[in-house]
Image (tube, coloured by chain):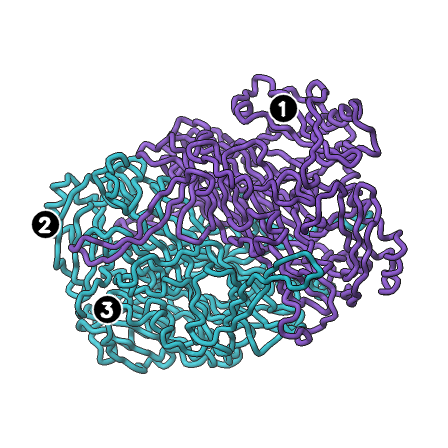
Chain colours: A cyan, B purple
């Protein structure tokens, strides 16, 4: 990814109206604008220095303990609302906890470990403007014949490549040419790297190494609206209800929260089981994109460091796009806003940060035609209508559409779709015939002077499944071929299922597809009436890429969890971010793979499933000037969770539903 | 699968109206009812015996040579319309070719090889009725306390398990109890196997071995309509045109044909390239489900033979469901009928056998939010509207929804969705605790007395891709980790792409996922302006199962292509069916793996890609009484086929489109 150099539009949505604090707030609700303001006031009123030296990097709900959330009852007040803040003063990183309800400081400690917090949007905007008044850069632009007014610079995290520990935060800038096109990403000022000291906000290194031609603007723009030819409507009204941040639809209830780092968080997803008298049964305590690692595959000076952690370095939520009704989401969608704390601590609104809609794709949820009963033709089916919650993060050049889709069957389908603009390298090549064999094995020539560099996208999900309770076990159901030993039949083989319950974290590391197996999270303490373990299984929808980087390479050390698509850890409130809490300049000493090395017990305890949806991306010409959607994801599918297909209810249950269609 | 014991409803649609023969028929058009009647007339009027000993097993278009089809011009008459017929008389299988235009016999030869043709629906109906008047069966039913009027028997192909060659066609019957429920499949009369000689139409073996309880009817029915809560509408009209069997939509044109064996056939799919002055460029000459192999994993006497070839034994098209408007397909769908020849040669109509509709799921085809240009917020996106062609085959208990989805991006997405009813085994077990360790490792206990047996679904597609011309090459783009040798940068590794062009069929056999690679079909004779090979790539959407049966097991010999998900063969008009032309009682001597052993050259020649979408199915309680949809498939995605993303056209092109929105 490249980065957002302007936050004007987010600021223009600055929320100025008073916000009524709700005593009945859900304990997992995101901080309201009022609460964010309270956080700021407390920080300013305590011993901490005041702006401009105050720099707020993260403000989020400090979630109450899980048992408190689970015990929470709407009739009683929430557990104390606390905020977790990461701020920097005087070159140090502070972790601050604030009681929002009584506006008091709970704790403030300095973090001395390696790595730095999320970059703020404001410091990125400031940094991106520096080259435009930096004489050596002005010279470079002039030598290339580029008008300075057309130049846009973007911010690129510098990574870590074995440098000794330093308290200085450094950021790299790369610059592009807009002008006739909005698609500046495909017009790099290749060969120039600018290094900024972020705390001092000044250029500390400058290098203009080579100057291949700037690719042409013609044919690169993507603006211009289209027609919408299929309309959706819900004449009988929407089938879902939103109450604060809680959503109910069909048999599902869940809570939505926006976080500057994670983006969309789904919590407390539970499903109503009519076979158990309408009991709500828990499925997912909390699920979100924990990290998004995007390493590029060109080791040249201007490219080797491009190994982005879009969540931990940039903030998947901070870069969320305001969704456009009837374009990003269909006409029957509802929207929800989000609020984050700006660098100065003020609340900033992201309007329409989520949309929620009922999806109908023209498919059926189930069907059957029965020709087999003489004299009858039975044709039964149910149209598939599901509920989708969507957030889009546009992290510089790339756009990620992330969907959580709930189905009446009990499935949760998680979708990740990639679109947006490729990161390209300026080159002298104008035809592949100029590329000597063995030369430039790092990308695809898309148009003249434009090489799109090979890269990966590893989207790692945090999935704290609580299948019908907290204590769960991860089970691998391996398919094994067996020989037939009974000589009375002529069949010689079959496959059977060998279930292996994971005991410790080592058993929870899975390279998907290496052996045929189904991966389940079950509740070993509960059984169906038939005696089967109650569970959900993980089904990949086809993005199984794992990291191909060498184990001793620096980006691989930082994202060392990328070699396996599945990890299972015991629940630990502090283990939320797959690449660690401080990812900018991280050294790989605090990530999922490191935690897993402790090899803790994961059997019949509260466990978290981590799943990476991975894409190796070899660019093709069709990805230019803007790539068509490439989609994948996974399904969490009930597997002996229900006694039977939840679509099929008794006649009485159906009649009750008919009287109350929104229940 | 089990099988269809009644064809009453198909017959009730018998087409009686005259059919105007069209001189401008497309050479790949399916046979019209009139043409089918002509075929019958010719057979009856030649030397062949007349009904009832006449038994027609297959009638389809005898496709003209590919070069003739490609040279065909709508202004000139079609190449001679010929029908290919498989019929049986006097215990022999005849292959007959008939010139339909002049109603004459072209050839008639007897087939002496192993295996038998498709079963007819009529003989299955007749066979399924035999037990009901067979005294030993009547006794068996009485002993189990089952009313004969409630019994439904289904037809199960017997497979081949090493028996010596025989000219007798044998079929097994298994019986079930309907009565209070339409869902008889889940109420087996377990332990009874009936063997029928199909040519004599009489029971030749009968065995009543064990009698576990018949599972209860309560909770098994699936009938009862639902509400439809999201409506789709196209106020500006449909965006596609159907002319005979040819469809045009957006940049796509293709031809649809119904075949009793293959079901839906997509032919001559070509895409209009506005960058090449609106030239039509060929992508897919012909694509369809070539075979659907479903082996079950219980070697007991009543189960070991259940290794169904749904296309080659039963006919994927013969079992197509008439689609219900607004249920199986959305309100904006159009429908197409199909016709097959009954056992007596008469045309039989399958109304609404295909539907065609524009799909809008609420997704975007591409998007980008640009925050990076100071003072601007750019938000651009295109709603994703695609064109879907659907056929549903309900092969006894299972329903397969097969979709071909065309996208303006140039992608073709092929979807396979499984729903319907599991094949279950009656058992004494009423709780899993009764199952001793090591015992009954063949299925899942779903409800009392009901074990759903493990099985696979291997859906093998025939994909005669013609990427911008006939001569193509299969390329594996393998991703390989490389070390950085340039000491001036601290990066240590990256991955690069090593392209391997397949030279012979051995290079075309691929176990998907074994190594990271993209699989492409390219036209090595054409390049993009940049010099890249023009191609399409195959992307799996996550059903990678390969066969786990032992190589020496009989069903594995018959479906020996099932160990690899991808095969590439040179185009050969006679190699259409992955498991061979005669699959009932086949011995594995004529299938895709056997052809591939010839190791023919597949480089820069007309090639066919065969791809299997594979599911291992471990049943869960949610699959009962009727399983929620399980979906997968693959995408054929343009990969340096276009010069750029075809969504992005010049302004002039867009204005022209605007004037003629359906072009």
- Given residues B72 and A66, the one toward you in this image is B72
Q: What is the spatial separation of the Cα atoms under label 1 and label 2, in whole angstroms?
A: 71 Å
**Mark identifier at residue A136:** 2
Q: Quadrant of residue A3?
A: bottom left
Q: SS for tag 1?
A: loop
The percent position of residue A355, horizontal first and vertical second, equals: 47, 57
In the rendered image, the vertical position of residue A271 relative to residue A357, given as above or below: below
Mark 3 or mark 2: name the one nearer the start of the chain: 3
Q: Nearer the viewer, mark 3 or mark 2?
A: 2
Q: CA distance from mark 3 to mark 2?
A: 29 Å
**Whole-percent x and y of residue A21?**
42, 73
Q: Can residue A226 be seen from the camera position used here?
A: no
The answer to whether residue A480 is above or below residue B566 is: below
Q: Is residue A281 left or right of residue A370?
A: left
Question: Dot 1 corresponds to which residue?
Answer: B25
Which quarter of the figure has residue B75? top right
Which residue is labeled 3 in the image?
Answer: A55
Total marks shown come to 3
Determine whether label 3 and label 2 are within 8 Å by CB.
no
Image location (x, y in percent) of residue A268 = 50, 71
Disc 3 secondary structure class? strand
Q: Chain of mark 1?
A: B
Q: Nearer the viewer, residue A350 or A619?
A: A619
Toward the front, the furthest residue is B164
Question: In which quadrant is the C terminus of chain A drawn?
Answer: bottom right
The chain letter for the residue carrying disc 2 is A
Q: Label 2, secondary structure: give it.
A: helix
């Amino acid at each position: 990814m490249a980065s957002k150099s302007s936050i004007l539009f987010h600021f223009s949505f600055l929320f100025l109206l008073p916000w009524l604090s709700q005593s009945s707030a859900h304990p997992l609700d995101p901080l309201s604008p009022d609460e964010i303001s309270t956080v700021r006031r407390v920080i300013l009123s305590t011993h901490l220095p005041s702006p401009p030296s105050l720099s707020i990097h993260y403000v989020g709900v400090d979630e109450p303990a899980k048992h408190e959330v689970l015990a929470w009852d709407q009739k009683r007040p929430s557990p104390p609302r606390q905020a977790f803040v990461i701020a920097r003063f005087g070159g140090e990183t502070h972790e601050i906890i604030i009681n929002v309800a009584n506006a008091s400081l709970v704790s403030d400690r300095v973090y001395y470990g390696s790595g730095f917090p999320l970059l703020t949007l404001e410091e990125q905007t400031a940094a991106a403007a520096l080259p435009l008044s930096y004489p050596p850069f002005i010279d470079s632009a002039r030598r290339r014949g580029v008008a300075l007014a057309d130049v846009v610079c973007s911010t690129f995290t510098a990574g870590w490549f074995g440098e000794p520990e330093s308290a200085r935060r450094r950021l790299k800038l790369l610059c592009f040419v807009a002008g006739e096109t909005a698609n500046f990403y495909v017009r790099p000022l290749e060969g120039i790297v600018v290094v900024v000291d972020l705390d001092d906000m000044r250029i500390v290194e400058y290098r203009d190494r080579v100057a291949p031609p700037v690719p042409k603007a013609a044919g690169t723009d993507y603006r211009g609206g289209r027609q919408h030819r299929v309309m959706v409507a819900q004449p009988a009204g929407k089938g879902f209800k939103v109450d604060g941040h809680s959503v109910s639809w069909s048999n599902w209830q869940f809570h939505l929260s926006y976080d500057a780092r994670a983006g969309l968080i789904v919590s407390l997803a539970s499903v109503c089981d009519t076979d158990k008298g309408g009991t709500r049964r828990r499925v997912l305590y909390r699920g979100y994109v924990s990290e998004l690692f995007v390493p590029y595959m060109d080791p040249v000076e201007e490219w080797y460091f491009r190994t982005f952690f879009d969540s931990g370095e940039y903030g998947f939520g901070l870069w969320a796009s305001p969704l456009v009704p009837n374009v990003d989401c269909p006409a029957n969608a509802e929207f929800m806003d989000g609020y984050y704390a700006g660098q100065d601590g003020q609340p900033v609104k992201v309007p329409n940060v989520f949309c929620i809609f009922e999806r109908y794709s023209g498919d059926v949820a189930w069907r059957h035609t029965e020709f087999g009963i003489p004299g009858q033709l039975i044709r039964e089916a149910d149209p598939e209508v599901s509920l989708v919650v969507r957030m889009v993060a546009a992290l510089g050049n790339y756009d990620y559409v992330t969907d959580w889709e709930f189905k009446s069957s009990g499935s949760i389908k998680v979708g990740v779709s990639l679109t947006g603009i490729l990161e390209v390298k300026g080159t002298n090549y104008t035809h592949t015939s100029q590329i000597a064999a063995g030369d430039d094995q790092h990308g695809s020539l898309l148009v003249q002077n434009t090489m799109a560099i090979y890269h990966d996208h590893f989207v790692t999900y945090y999935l704290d499944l609580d299948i019908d309770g907290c204590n769960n076990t991860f089970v691998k159901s391996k398919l094994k071929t067996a020989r037939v030993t009974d000589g009375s039949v002529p069949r010689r083989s079959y496959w059977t299922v060998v279930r292996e319950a994971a005991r410790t974290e080592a058993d929870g590391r899975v390279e998907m597809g290496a052996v045929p197996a189904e991966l389940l999270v079950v509740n070993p303490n509960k059984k169906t009436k038939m005696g089967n373990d109650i569970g959900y299984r993980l089904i990949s929808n086809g993005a199984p890429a794992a990291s191909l980087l060498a184990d001793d390479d620096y980006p691989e050390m930082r994202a060392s969890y990328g070699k396996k698509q599945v990890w299972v850890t015991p629940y630990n409130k502090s283990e939320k971010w797959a690449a660690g809490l401080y990812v900018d300049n991280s050294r790989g000493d605090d990530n999922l793979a490191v935690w897993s090395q402790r090899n803790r017990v994961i059997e019949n305890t509260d466990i978290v499933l981590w799943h990476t949806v991975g894409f190796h991306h070899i660019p093709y010409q069709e990805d230019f000037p803007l790539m068509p959607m490439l989609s994948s994801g996974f399904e969490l599918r009930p597997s002996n969770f229900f006694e039977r297909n939840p679509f099929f209810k008794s006649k009485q249950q159906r009649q009750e539903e008919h009287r109350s269609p929104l229940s």
